[in-house]
Amino acid sequence: MRIQLSDHFNYKRLLRYTLPSIIMLVFTSIYGVVDGFFVSNFAGKTPFTAVNFIMPFLMILGSFGFMFGTGGGALIAKTLGEGKPRMANDLFSLIVYTSAVCGIVLAALGILFIRPLTSMLGADGQLLEDSVVYGRIILLAIPAYILQYEFQCLFATAGKPTLGLCVTMAAGLTNIVLDALFVAVLHLSLCGAAAATAVSQYIGGIIPLIYFARPNKSLLRLGKTHFNGRWLKNTCINGSSELTSNISMSLVSMLYNFQLLKYAGEDGVAAYGVLMYVSLVFQAVFIGYSVGSAPVISYHYGAQNHDELKSLLKKSLILIGLFSVVMFASANLLAEPLSYIFVGYDDGLFRLTLRGFMIFSFSFLFSGHAIFSSSFFTALNDGLVSAAISFLRTFVFEVAAVLIFPLIWGIDGIWLSTVSVEVMAVAVATVFLKVKRKKYRYY
């Protein structure tokens, strides 16, 4: 039976509706990890370090897709809840066209400035050259990368989360197959890994574009629209938390790399890369749930169904808590085998990665709460509160911790900093949920 945004959501229905988004985000994260696996095992430690070094910059550009997708998705779902489907489609079309143009501009600027930026961040020699080569190939696909992230959010808003999952799986399988072919068989090293990722991003971005441009059975369809500065402004403000979060995380990752080069050399950057790959996959569960549940929250907020809003918040916090425990337990069970898969060829690097893994895993107990809380306020079209939670969690707390903790605990302080940040973020998110409860009537 088809689930509609207007339905009452019990635990079973909520999980059924959000599961495609969870799997979609997890799958996206996994195929993003595939580059690292093949490069590390078939090209070597320096190329692997280069992928991890330049990835934060590429993720900053892709995060504009999340801004348009989450901010626009919440606004579109709210408009649908208010009974205005035509306006919702006009808004949907404007957001997609604007994001595509934005992607082309960002790709051109990225290709132009990637070398001086990489050098400024501390890379030199072969690390600099490898980072530039990998980055420039990926940048050719940035417009599609932005659309891919955007549509991952908008498929749920259109009432087609399962279709979004299918598109993501197609893109992911393409990346895995091409990585194996280009890197392991044809030995194309970084160029092959980058090309595989770029092709998969075009599949993930262009197929949805074609689907929504044709007659379809979803709630949304691309068509003629008109420029509306207020719509775009509201979309950007509402999605600013996701943009802020992704940009902050990427900038902080650059700072982590800088600190790790200082305290542990290239091995530190490589170890951190492994932790980030695992973190992306595990946190994708929280992000996927947040993305999948956001249109439901926005719809019922727009329809002024306060009892349903209260129910959705309570159920979501319980589910996030359960997910957190599972993620923590899984991280501890998988720490050794995952570390070995990526860097088992180097004993010193393996031991460094494993120790970092065991400390870092405690962050999964807390990160889901802040991620969902930020998304919850985005769904309520309160982008400023959402952005405040994200900015404090992913930038302010992170920068302070990663600069101070290593002075006390050395390399262990870098791993501990992430754990402390997530604890502080839970406290901040809880305060905002309490302060805003009367305004939005979810308690």
Image (tube, helix red, strand yellow):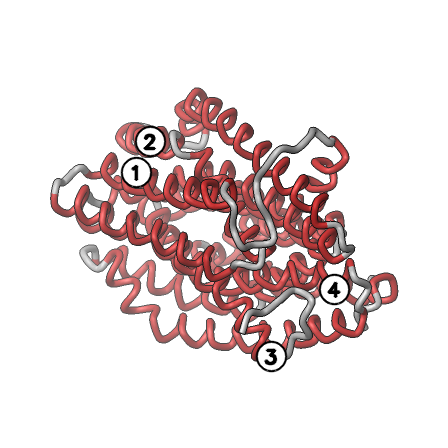
At mark 1, the secondary structure is: helix
Q: Residue at x 18, y 56 (%)?
A: 345
Amino acid type, mark 2? Ile
Quarter of the figure that contains the C terminus: bottom right
Q: Which residue is mark 1?
A: 194
**Callout 4–callout 3 Cβ contact below 8 Å:** no
Please state which of residues 361 and 103 is positioned toward the viewer in this rendering.
103
At mark 3, the secondary structure is: helix
Q: Which residue is mark 3?
A: 11
Report if residue 399 is visible in the image: no
Report if residue 45 is visible in the image: yes
Q: Earlier in the sequence, mark 1 or mark 2?
A: 2
Amino acid type, mark 3? Tyr
Amino acid type, mark 4? His
Question: Is label 3 or label 2 in front?
Answer: 3
Q: Which residue is mark 2?
A: 137
- Label 1 neighbour load within 10 Å: few <14, some 14-19, many 20+: many
Q: Earlier in the sequence, mark 3 or mark 2?
A: 3
- Label 4 neighbour load within 10 Å: few <14, some 14-19, many 20+: many
Q: Residue at x 71, y 54 (%)?
A: 80
User: What's the mark number on residue 178?
Assistant: none
- Alpha carbon distance from label 3 to label 2: 43 Å
Question: Is label 4 or label 3 in front?
Answer: 4
User: What's the mark number on residue 300?
Assistant: 4
Q: Earlier in the sequence, mark 2 or mark 4?
A: 2
At mark 4, the secondary structure is: helix
Please state which of residues 354 and 11 is positioned toward the viewer in this rendering.
11
- Alpha carbon distance from label 1 to label 4: 42 Å
Q: Residue furthest left?
A: 185
